[in-house]
Amino acid sequence: MAAPKEPWTSPLGGAILFLLLPGVLTLPCSHIALDAPVVRWGGRVSASCTVWTHRCAFPGEGATQVMWRWDEELFAGNQQSLGNGVEVSNITIGPLNRTVTTISCLVKRKMEVAQLINLTQVQAGYPPSEPQNLTCIMNVTTKNLTCHWDPGQDSLLPTKIALHGVQTDKNCTIHRATISPCVPPSGQSSCTIPRHDFQLYQFVRLWVSVENDLGATASRPLCADPMDLVKLDPPVLQALRSHPEETNCVEVSWEGAEGSGRYMHQDCQLRFQSELDQEWALAEFPNVAPFTWKTQHCGFRYGAHYQAQMRCRRFPVGYWSDWSPPKNFTTHEKEPSGNLVTWWKTKPKRTEKGTEVLLMWKPMGAEETHGKILGYLVTTGRSLTLCNTTTLHCTFSLPPGTQKVLLRAYNSKGPSPPTEVLLTDKKGQPVPQIRALPWDEKSIQVFWDPPGTSSPVAYILEWHRVTSMDLPENEVQWMRLGNGRISQGLIQEDIQPFQRYNISVYPLYKDGRGVSKYVEAYTMQKAPSKGPRLHTGNITKSTASLYWEPIPIGKQNGFITNYTIFWNSTNEDTSSAVVNASVDSFTLRGLWPSKMYQVHIMASNAAGSTNGTILTLHTKAMDDMDISVVYLVVGLLLAMIIVLIFCFQKSKRMKTQFWPSVPDPANSSLGKWAPSILQEETPLAPKSCEMSPVIISAIFVIDTEEKKCLSCGKSDSVKALDDSLPIDGQGPLPHKAPDATLMSGLVLPASYVNSPESVQYAKVVGEAYRTQDQTPTPAFYIRSNSTQPLLGDLTPSPKPYENLWFHGGCSARDSGTSSCGFQEEALLDFPLLQGLRVEGDEELSNFRRVY
């Protein structure tokens, strides 16, 4: 036996072995048999693999095991040995869920890898679906018959489709002639039968057949006269115009379809639509005779722009043609009709001309304008024009005494009937409560409770967007609800999410309107788009004042519920505080002096929070009060130092000011000089007319001419003192001349003059000085160190050592008799002055300092 050749490789993959013998045909070594090569989707298939081992060149020796492969998995079937090296294996595979499935047969010996020896394929699909809605149309120009159908569900298998037809009678029971089948292109569900395969005005029976490996089916037959299947070309609109004038009728003219269709009676339809309509309106023109392509239709609106199209079909049956190209036209105008819906508000500002009124109104309906509205006219009952505008609102000054105005809309044909607006400001009962809830992101549902005792005839809903700026007049939106028994309304006009709206409800009564009630609402909320801007105020060593600018309403995106302030410093935990939304300032307390803090603020609403600006602040080392105290203490210390320096520099003067030098008579030189008898003698109490007794420490006499003994004995000195004092305002008493020997043994004190350190008080008692030329007038001089001011008249400055008080108090100086104000009673207050007598010149020009 010759050696076998290399196994043949199948195009499906794997190797199929053949045995070649000399002089004989090549025989396969395996075979696969299927019970059905095509199965229904999800079904099963049974396969049998027969292997002739003596025809195949298998490596190795031993028993042969037949295996199956399906979906990359190996299966062991039911294997039988028929003898003579023939092995048969049977298996059932499924369910099949692919259009094409490959089944492979393999052999295996001992521990060797399974070897592919044969394979086959199985298809899965569905039986063909019945075609639906068979429709055939004959083009009146080409005369071809084109049929369309719905193929139904795809069978997933190769399918044969054909359009069949026969010529028949009216009842489609007699088979007269067969029409050649029409096979459509692959993937299409239409086919055209040429004009020469059928006859006009003779019925035909048409159907569609479909066949595949799992079965065959056909559509329901269509039996019709080809002329009944005609579809005309669309007509051409020529003109549309209003006719007759002052009516809502339009005359329509058109051109019929090309070809033989224009010779047929036709049914036609006209559809039209204005620029304000959402749907087309339809007008029917049945059984229009050939070449009479003109008709009339009424029901159009005045002064409206329209678009029109037309289509036709063969009368009495046939397919409608396509719509013609559109044609535009405009109807003629007419005066507006109907009343305007109005609403008005008074402004708080009053002028000299009257009350400011804002009148608003809604536009007329399209069926009432009868053309393009050119403007609106507001007049009084006396035809006084208050406003002429093209907008839907008007502001004017209401003349005094006027309670109603007339509103008209006008177009090119004239004005509308007047709408009477009653402008009474009577305040009625408001609604007790109002609520607003979001309906969706662009609408708000408003609810209110009806007034308890009053019955409104209507309600006005007014709303506007809340912003940080003044609201323009045209931003106010409103609507009138004509039924006074309702208690809710839906606002849909000009509503946007994340915007705040102010909504007001006004009840309207027969004799006026009620007070408004308002509420604010959002359709949707989100976190604020912007945070507050934080600023610092007064900062101390332990506190810091903060304030912030409110977020613009357009950026809040919801109702602000609260603000949260956060602050911290280096190496410290963050502290926070929550304040109400109505608060715009806050004070941080418990801060450390001379430290840096970071502060930021967060604004929150129901949908989220947004951080504001971050601020850095430094606390002070000391408060202003502390600095003031330090400055005050330093100032006081400096003042004290300056005072001390001044006191040290002027110590003698300061000592004299605070501690005046008062002579001690007991320790004075006069006390040592006076005779002991004088020092120990105690004078008797003086009489009422005499001077009071004094104790004289020292008595000395200063004579400008010569020094004499003041007294040589106790009796003489007392007598000299007594004689020198005037009694009862009379002349001076006579006295003896002083003894010169007394002055020789006494060290006289230094003389005193008026100086800044002390003020010398002196009293000179003289007798007719200046008038005695021969004998000097005895004088009595008393001095004392005192800081009290000089007494006397405010006369020009005296000469040196001249005391004007002494001279100003004297009288009758020219007569030679001196009566001074210093009397005996004065000496009682100055006892030491009684021991001093000065004799000599009155001007004391030769007054010497005595030691």
Image: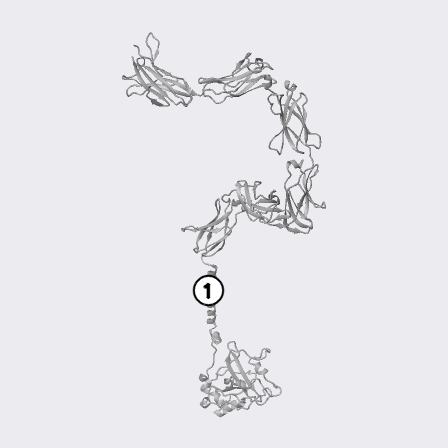
What residue is drawn where x is 54% and y is 42%?
A: 444
Which residue is the extreme one toward the right? 382
Where is residue 824 drawn, in percent x and y?
A: 54, 87
Front-lying residue, 260 or 571: 260
Residue 737 makes an appearance in the image = no
Mark 1 neighbour density, 10 Å: few (under 14) some (14–19) many (20 or more):
few
Extreme residue in the left direction? 62
Which residue is at the front of the view, 764 or 489? 489
To which residue does mark 1 refer? Answer: 633
Total marks shown come to: 1
85 or 540: which is nearer to us?
Answer: 85
Q: Is residue 41 above or below residue 523?
A: above
User: In the figure, residue 139 lies in which quadrant?
Assistant: top right
Indicate the quadrant containing the N terminus: top left, top right, bottom left or bottom right: top left
Question: Is 767 located above or below residue 339 in the figure?
Answer: below
Q: Is residue 208 left or right of residue 100?
A: right
Q: Which picture quadrant has residue 102?
A: top left
Q: Secondary structure at mark 1?
A: helix
Which of the 4 quarters of the picture holds residue 172? top right
Where residue 80 sits: x, y (%)? 31, 17
For the question of whether residue 563 can be seen, the reply is yes
Residue 417 locus on image (x, y percent): 69, 40
Which coloring applies here? one colour
Q: Callout 1, which amino acid?
A: Val
Measured as percent of width and height from the top left, residue 430 is found at 59, 49
